[in-house]
Image: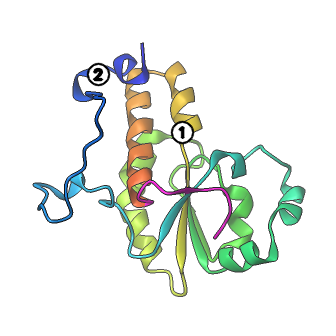
Amino acid sequence: MDREEKAGLAQYFIVSDAVRYTSEEVNNVAPGQTVKHYSPNVPCFMIASERQRDRTLHEQVEQQLTQEERDILSQSVIIDYSQQLSRYKEHSLAYRDLSPEGNASKAASQIFDTLRWSESIRGANRVYVPDLSGIAESANNSDQESEALVLAVKDKLTRAASGVVIGTFQ
């Protein structure tokens, strides 16, 4: 049984062998159909899970970041969830956590406003969000509603970053 079935959402997900995309020339019926639906007006990227919380101690962040990454972060906004990217906070231009305690309901209710906030930060050249694949998988142990909300937060952040996951700050 996969996550969608456990969350009672299997009827809404149909997997086929062929991947199909809507042509750029075809108007979508609703904005939510586009991959970039939640994208801010600043380039946005998802940070791969191996660069997130608990991989190294805070003191090792200094050694792990190149000077180029520090320079990039100083002109970047971080939108976090459950403190996954908190160790980079002091290096960023601006930082906001959708829910430091990992409350998916709170995070889901704040995503759109937080993405719009990121656009308003003067001097911001990039926005970084965490890749929530690991969190979405661990949500299987919680109740169905929480799991569905974590998947919704993951989907919205993935759309904000147009699905682009990176392992370095670039």
The three-letter amino acid code for the residue at tag 2 is Ala
| Residue 164 colored in magenta in the image | yes
User: Along the horizontal axis of the image, is 153 left or right of 141?
Assistant: left
Q: CA gap, disc 1 to disc 2?
A: 18 Å
Q: Position of residue 62 (x, y in %)?
A: 86, 65
**Where residue 5 appears, x then y in whole percent?**
35, 18
Q: Which mark is residue 10?
A: 2
Circle 2: element type: helix
Determine whether 8 is above or below 47 in the image. Answer: above
The residue shown at (39%, 22%) is 144
Report the predominant secondary structure element of the magenta stretch: loop
Farthest bottom residue in view: 123
Name the residue: 26% across, 56% down.
Answer: 34
Mark 1 Cα shell of 10 Å, populated few (<14), some (14-19), many (≥20): some
Residue depicted at 68% across the width and 57% down the height: 86
- Residue receiving disc 1: 133
**Residue at 89% across / 63% down in the picture?**
63
Q: Is residue 70 above or below residue 105?
A: below
- Of residues 12 and 8, the one nearer the viewer is 12
Residue type indicated by callout 1? Ser
Q: Which mark is residue 158?
A: none
Residue 109 pos. (x, y %): 36, 50
Residue 123, picture quadrant: bottom right
**Residue 131 location, x and y as percent?**
55, 48
Instruction: Say which of 26 and 33 sits in front.
Output: 26
